[in-house]
Image (cartoon, rainbow, N blue to C red):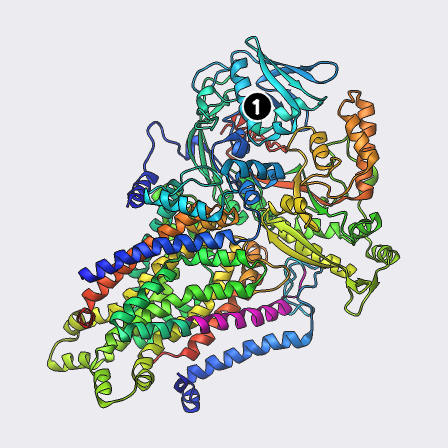
Amino acid sequence: MGQLIYNRILQLLAVVFGVGALTFVLMRSLPGDMAFRIASSRYGQDNVSAEAAEYIRQELNLNQSGISSFFSWLIDLAQFNLGNSLVSGQPVSDIVSHQLGHSVMLAVAGLALSVLIAFPLGLASVKWQKWFEPVAVVFSIAVRALPVFVIGLIFILMFALYWQWLPVAGFDTPQHLILPTLTLAIALAATSNRIVASSTRQVLRAPFYQFSMMKGLSPLRTFQRHGVRNILLPVVAFIGIQFITVIEGIVMIESLFSWPGVGHGLAHAIFARDIPVIQGTALCLGVMFVMLNTVVDLLCYWIDPRIKEEQ
Amino acid sequence: MLAAFDNKKLYSNRSRLFGVLLLCVLISMSMIGWAMNVDPAEQNLSAVLMPPGAEYWLGSDHYGRNMFARLSEALRLSLSLAIICVLSASTIGCILGVIAGWYGRWLDNGLNIIVNILLAMPGLVFVLLFAALVPGSFTAIYIAIALVQWVEYFRVSRSLTQSLANSPEIQNALLLGFGRVYIFRHHLWPTLRSPVLTMAAFGAANAVLYMASLGFVYVGIQPPTSELGQMIVELFPYYGDAPWLLLQPLTMLALIVLAFHLIAGDKR
Amino acid sequence: MRIFTTALLALMFVFQANANTPPSKSNTVTISAAFEFANVDPSSSGYIFTRMQVIETLFDVDNLGNLLPGLALEATPNSELTEWTITLRDGVRFHDDSLMNADTVVNSLNIALGKYGSLGKVPVKNIVAQGENKVVIELSEAYKSLPAVLANYSNVILSRASYAEDGKVVNLIGTGPYTLFEVTPPHKITVKKFDGYWGKKASIEYATYLTGHRGESRVLQAISGQADIALQLPPASIMRLKMNPQTDVQSYSLPRTLVLKLNNAHPYLNSVKARQALSLAIDRKGIASAVLGTPDSGTAQLLPRSMSDWYLESFAHPESDIHKAKAMLKELGWTENSQGLLQRDDKVFELSLITYADRPELTNVATALQAQWKKLGVKLNVSITSSSSIPAGHQDGSLEVALIARNYGVIADPLVVLSNDFSAEGGDWGAMNWSNAEFNQLIKQLNYTLDADKYREKAQRAATILATELPVIPVSAYTEEVSVNKRLKGFHFDPFGRDFYLSDLEF
């Protein structure tokens, strides 16, 4: 366990440096004059001009060489200062915490709800294979093939327009969270319930499982003692990955519901060549990823201690 | 891997057959459109949003373009790109995942560190940067999506391999002297096959939908090419006026997913 | 770690209610549009804060483009138009209760001058205060339209406390009927009624602006009643809104025009005949009705009818004749090849068009244009990039064709925009590599012509030159569709985009 934590810390440092360098290099190699791009985001699309670009070039000292700006970024980072946005001048940590915070909130809520939906669905489709399984499969495929905004649109039409229970878009109150979360949860549960189902099926068929029932344990007991842990393993791994991909993948939901998250913010920042914001966001996402990996690994070890022994 | 497509198994499993048939129908639809030689980009601004009829088999879109021609071009483009994307993602992911899970210790740690640095690079940033680096190329975006998707395959195959590597079957096989490749084919792959093919089926649809979500933030649009994901975004505003238009690419997508899912099969 | 504690705290603050009577549906009017803003600095984001009536300018503009007194009562020039004396209004208080006087005005204007903005294009020599309520602006050249420039959003008057030492705007303490209550860039602003306003006080207590990124989302918000006023509505959803009993849909013509900016030095575009042919090949009626949803908005001139001095009746009905266009190009040496494309000296007539994604209609019009020019035999490659690639392409000469949505009303006097866009060296958003001696002369003269008839005569002549030589090709005028909830009374719309007129609204 200690070894794992130590490894993860090393990894964290490597990730910080690696992600920072990679984003930096990629951003600098993008076509287009940076000053112009920043001007168009700052002054509005109509108001960009060569003078604006020149003004920005002077103000932000964009003629600085790549290496020196990278190193000044690293030095700032060591003091936990992520710098300021080139477009708005606001501190990047504010922007990132606003955007990432909202995305994380939506992702956590959506994932939690999706687990609550996926597990019963998956287990039920194993238990009542004959008539429930086809229903679950059709549901999964139908939902999975639909883009998220169509699901969101259906929910808006139902809950916000027809029944007028919930608001259409925005991000102030808890009610504003419900529709985006529901949309996300349904979209996620469509895949995870299949993983739950196939994992359950495998476990139920496994010799050790059959053996313990032959031993005399009731099906319920067998499930509790032997089933749950084994089913969880690939599912936990899958859900862990879903989390990170979810944060980035909810671009559509954010656009549709005016939810101020990272997906939309990143698209704008890349358009605007706002390097500090991109680096800051990429960094936070990277750090979150490493911590998430750690949590998932710990969970896997807890579920299946054999892995620990092998190491 | 190829065992799944054994002739015997193919025809003995009815749903798998249905999936293959469905895929054939879709492919032939795309071929018919190509053979018909109707220009999917030709506009007729006085015949916009026409319902399906004699002249426009599947109706016309908001520029008066023939939907059938556009769908078949979109099928060709998106289908081939999605398959490339999924093949590369799953191959890289599974191979690396099995190696990491099996060899354990130094190799696993080493691979993990390198891989994690790559993985920690947020996928969306990566795809958007790629799209910005090579503007005007659908292939670049699909490749970027593959470089994001392989994560899932890696993780799942690594964790399954890790727990399986200690199981009695594998221990026995090793003791009996069977080679690693044999063990992979006969012990690991059957276990991996189900989740991996499931992920692949949805991964293909995912790739197209990722393209759609990029189109939602106006990235990657290249008029007048018809691409399934872009078409979905283009026709979205007309969901009230002409819902049959939006339903078409959506149905195509659902059919593709269904076909792949049926072919992937599910062990009963 | 600090990032995470900040994130956690941020999450908590998101849901925290505010102190005094918080804004609720019954006391708030909600507006939804596509604008996003970077920060509170007027030079970059002023356009949203003037609309929300937090900050004001020295002069205002009415619906027809005429100047009205705002924070200033009048502006008197000297005879050469090189020195303007501006008389300020008395008794105006900022939101922090300080009094507006000549010193604060000079301070605000000087800071605006030092930043990027509309004042920078005026040949300003000096801005000084004269007494308590007069400001004198000295210019190095004659400039007729100074008051119009002072009506632009980047030249608002803020109290001294709004600025930090280095001129950075830290707080938006203005003079408007509403004061800033809560601001979350880039999507949300809430403003509260200010009881110390010098003019007509507001009746509705709060107003909230929320960015609705997609047009469909704004339409849904309008239908559900979540947004009282929804702007920039897409043509596809107008029918549904019209059928909704709770909303009222209104159409307004804007001084914004969709134009094709051309590189007039490009070998395929450097003759007037070629440009006229390209313009003839555009099916403006089809684009206006099918793509934009506004059947009569096709236009072959830059400025709308409301700017009557510049509007040419003879060009009011643009014609579309693809055969005539083909014939004209044939005269220039182009012949049709086997694939239906025009060819000259082994080179295909191929052009690349850039446009930007911020306005969805631009992509749609570009797609339609691509097909129309294909019928003519011109291969148009469309690429969607950022709006900044247009001035960038202009500067480095790489631009061939660009589709832009130019706001000719950004300054109340169109002469300012036209003289910037079509100056002798061209303009980032105007002509590229085009110069006409007579036109330059006319523009110069217009700058000091005070006689209305002479002005109109010269303006009409200048407009005719633009419409005949086509250094830029106009495609369509803009009509904006606005949805207003029936619970609001007194709504009116500003086509110049300066004001939402919130203080005139009541429930």
When asked about the image quadrant of residue A55, the answer is top right
Residue A59: give x, y in percent of width and height: 51, 35
Residue B228 percent across, percent down from the top left: 55, 65
Seen from this angle, which residue lies furthest bottom?
A: B8
Name which residue lies at 68% across and 16% down. Answer: C83
Which structural element holds mark 1? loop
> The magenta stretch spans which residues?
B64-89
Residue drawn at x 32%, y 53% as measured from the top left: A287
Q: Is residue B81 one of those drawn in magenta?
A: yes
The answer to whether residue A234 is left or right of residue C298 is left
Crowd tier of the residue under label 1, counting other residues whose Cα lies within 10 Å: few below 14, some 14–19, many 20 or above: many
Q: Nearer the viewer, residue A207 or A18?
A: A18
Three-letter residue code for mark 1: Thr
In this rendering, the answer to whether B152 lies above or below C29 is below
Percent coordinates x, y for residue C270 in the rendering: 80, 49
- The image quadrant of residue B124 is bottom left
C26, C286: nearer the viewer = C286
Q: Residue at x 48, y 14 (%)?
A: C99
Which quadrant is the C terminus of chain A positioned in?
bottom left
Q: Chain of mark 1?
A: C
- Horizontal and vertical percent for residue A157? 46, 52
Give the dominant element type of the magenta stretch: helix, strand or loop.
helix
Q: Is residue C272 left or right of residue A258?
A: right
Q: Which residue is mark 1?
A: C57
Residue C258 highlighted magenta (yes or no): no
Tell me the quarter of the picture where residue A152 sits: bottom left
* Residue A132 appears in view: no
Above or below, C221 against C86 in this view is below
Is residue C440 among the parts visible in the rendering? yes
Q: Residue furthest top?
A: C131
